[in-house]
Amino acid sequence: MIIKMNQKVGLILPILLIVSLALFFHLKSEKAPKALSYLEAEKAEFDNYLKDFNKFYSNSEYQSRFQIFRDTIAYIRVMNSKNLSWTLGVNQFTDMTHEEVSNQLFNDIPRKEMVTLKSPERLSYPASIDWRSLGAVTGVKNQSPCACGWAFSTTGAVEGAYFIATGRLVSLSEEQLLDCSDYFGNNGCNGGYVTNSLDYVLQYGLVAETTYPYTGNPSICNAALINPPAATITVYNHVTQDSSDALLTAVAGSPISIDVQADSWINYSGGVLNAPCTSTRYNYSALVVGYNTSANPPYYIVKTSWGTGYGQGGYILVAITSGPGSSCVQGQPVQVIA
């Protein structure tokens, strides 16, 4: 009897093994197409992204860019699941590493303890203002591939001040600042400062963008192009540092140049960004063109120089908070008067 049982077990075990293996490979074959189709969907999404942003890569670079894209998308999904007051999304930087974006957009800007040259006796401002609708702001420009946000912040502040003084809006030349302001302490795509640039503008003024077009490739100053200037200024003032009241009062008077920590801005898509000011060094210069204190949360309207495909048509909304502010937006603002 025992012998017969052993014989039956000997027959059953191989059969069970065959059935188990068949079931395993069947389930594996069912899962494989799903995994493959998910990867294919990601590749299709990446291919559409390349078309939308007019990007082309060799076969070898395609794979590395695809992986960066996947990692960024995963990060965006995690952040957007947190119910923050802002959202992240796809833009021209999505298939670039943080180091690449930093090299293309940012330069080191140390904080300086400013002497406030002119302070309003009474801090007062309307609940909201938008200099775009008032005609004081030119279209969003694109600094790529040169890390010269300082030049665009400068021209934006001068454009706004000149409009307020004269009623004429002129798009001014960033290339003039890139090529001609090195003796004032600027260094082209390797960095520069709004205050150095404004010192240059005080002396020479700025010509129109159409007269001295932007190339993003600094070269020898073309002295034949810089006279006569299309716009001049009379003075620039340091706005009281680390004060939302002071910055709001200044913005009520004109668009204001600011230095910020912009690392958290890279993947911004919409909403009101609120990122901490983490050090006393900044890496990007932008332009505050308005604000809304009645909104929840209240925010500044900030113009970037990253093209209209970024953020909200080239703009980002930054939360109004205390101290140096979100992204250090209140750290060292400068106001221009024409």
Image: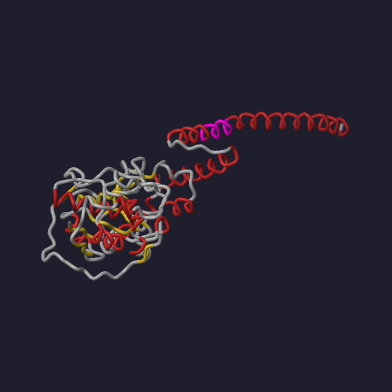
Image position, residue 277 (x, y; %): 34, 61
Viewer-closest of 287 and 151: 151
The total number of labels drawn is 0
The outermost residue toward the right is: 3
Up-down relation of residue 237 to residue 320 (above or below): below
Left or right of residue 9: residue 283: left
Q: Quadrant of residue 311?
A: top left
Left or right of residue 204: residue 180: right
Viewer-closest of 87 and 157: 157
Task: Residue at 36% x, 58% y: name it.
Answer: 261
Using the rendered image of the protein, determine whether residue 298 is visible from the camera's viewpoint.
Answer: no
Q: Main secondary structure of the magenta part?
A: helix
Q: How is the image coloured?
A: secondary structure
Using the rendered image of the protein, determine whether residue 202 is visible from the camera's viewpoint.
Answer: yes
The outermost residue toward the left is: 122
Up-down relation of residue 283 to residue 272 (above or below): below
Q: Where is the N terminus found, in terms of image quarters?
A: top right
Task: Residue at 51% x, 35% y: name it.
Answer: 42
Left or right of residue 50: residue 28: right
Image position, residue 89 (x, y; %): 39, 42
Q: Where is the C terminus found, in terms of image quarters?
A: bottom left
Up-down relation of residue 92 to residue 51 (above or below): below
Image position, residue 73 (x, y; %): 46, 42
Up-down relation of residue 39 to residue 74 (above or below): above
Q: Which residues are magenta?
A: 34-42
Task: Let me know if residue 245 is in the magenta part.
Answer: no
Image position, residue 177 (x, y; %): 33, 55
